[in-house]
Amino acid sequence: MKTLMAYLAGLLFGLGLAIGGMTDPARVLGFLDLFGNWDPTLAFVMGGAVITTFIGYRWVLRQPHPLFAAGFQLPTRRDLDARLLGGATLFGVGWGLSGYCPGPAVASLAGPTPPLLALLIAMIVGWWLARQLPASSSRASSSLHRS
Amino acid sequence: MDWMASIQGLIGGVLIGLAAVWLMASLGRIAGISGIVSGLLLDRPQGDSAWRVAFVAGLVSGPLLLALTGSGLGNVVGQSGAVVGEPVAGVTTMLIAGLLVGVGTGIGSGCTSGHGVCGLARLSPRSLAATLTFMAAAIVTVFVVRHVGG
């Protein structure tokens, strides 16, 4: 049952990315190019997603526990550190070079091309490299909330 | 302005939001793609892999379904009906970009979905800072590539 629920969530996510145009790097870069022929589509996608999630989470997180799990697994850290901001900067440069962030890159496997596969393989290598870096002082970034 | 693209963007965004809410309601998990996929491939969590595999299968089958059914619901610039757009650069640029995306989301604990959608919806200060930072870095990068380097 957990597997089916996760599949449905992934399916909705993938449909949303594709219908929203996020599986097209040209759409994404058109948004990031403020000084060119600006494409606002990504702002509508982000806006729709954040507002829907904000409303939905307010209701869901008031429930005692998820339908098919013991508790909600939420990040608890609220401090800003160099890893967070440095990582976000590196990610932003890669995103700006390619027009792919991880979700659209994985979803675009529906229409694979050699550049996309190169990006995905390098992304996995990058995740592995990030895990080799020493962890920051406060490691606990996630905890299980039970009620 | 292309109103059809914007309306589709809004619909797509709502679907992504529903997906995030559904994953939290059913399994109690943040719908962060970099975390879900990197956890699956590199951490191999005992008894915690099946849902990740299923989520990724769903993520790919969404666009695949739209393409195979000829739904015409794709939103690729200048190609009505196309679902997955062409990459904008070759293999070498994509290798560099992929490495940056991987290292960056790895040490920054999230990407556009985890920080940009779920984190902002939870009003997390870390996610707000991360989202503003990667947006700014991406905008500067595109500016340099398109308007300075060219």
Image (cartoon, rainbow, N blue to C red):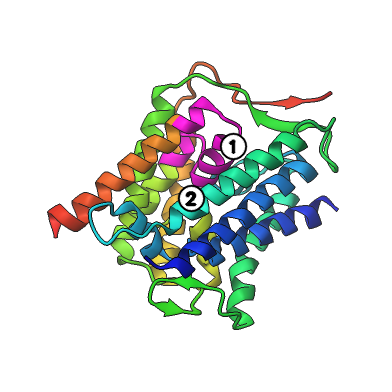
Residue closer to the observer: A78 or B40: A78
Q: Is residue B104 above or below residue B51?
A: above
Predominant SS of the magenta segment: helix
Secondary structure under badge 1?
Answer: helix
Q: Residue at x 75, y 52 (%)?
A: B50
Q: Residue at x 62, y 23 (%)?
A: A76
Residue A146: percent from left, percent from top: 81, 25
Real-space CA distance between mark 2 and mark 1, rounded to the nearest whole angstrom: 27 Å
Residue closer to the observer: B42 or B97: B97
Q: Is residue B62 above or below residue A129?
A: below
Circle 1 residue: B121
- Is residue B84 visible in this depiction of the protein? no
Q: Residue at x 50, y 16 (%)?
A: A137
- Is residue B134 visible in this depiction of the protein? yes
Residue A21: percent from left, percent from top: 48, 65
- Seen in the image, is A100 located left or right of residue B48? left
Q: Residue at x 54, y 46 (%)?
A: B113
Residue B99: percent from left, percent from top: 38, 48
Q: Mark 1 belongs to which amino acid?
A: Ala
Looking at the rendering, the stretch of residues picked out in magenta corresponds to: B104-128
- Seen in the image, is B87 located left or right of residue B73? left
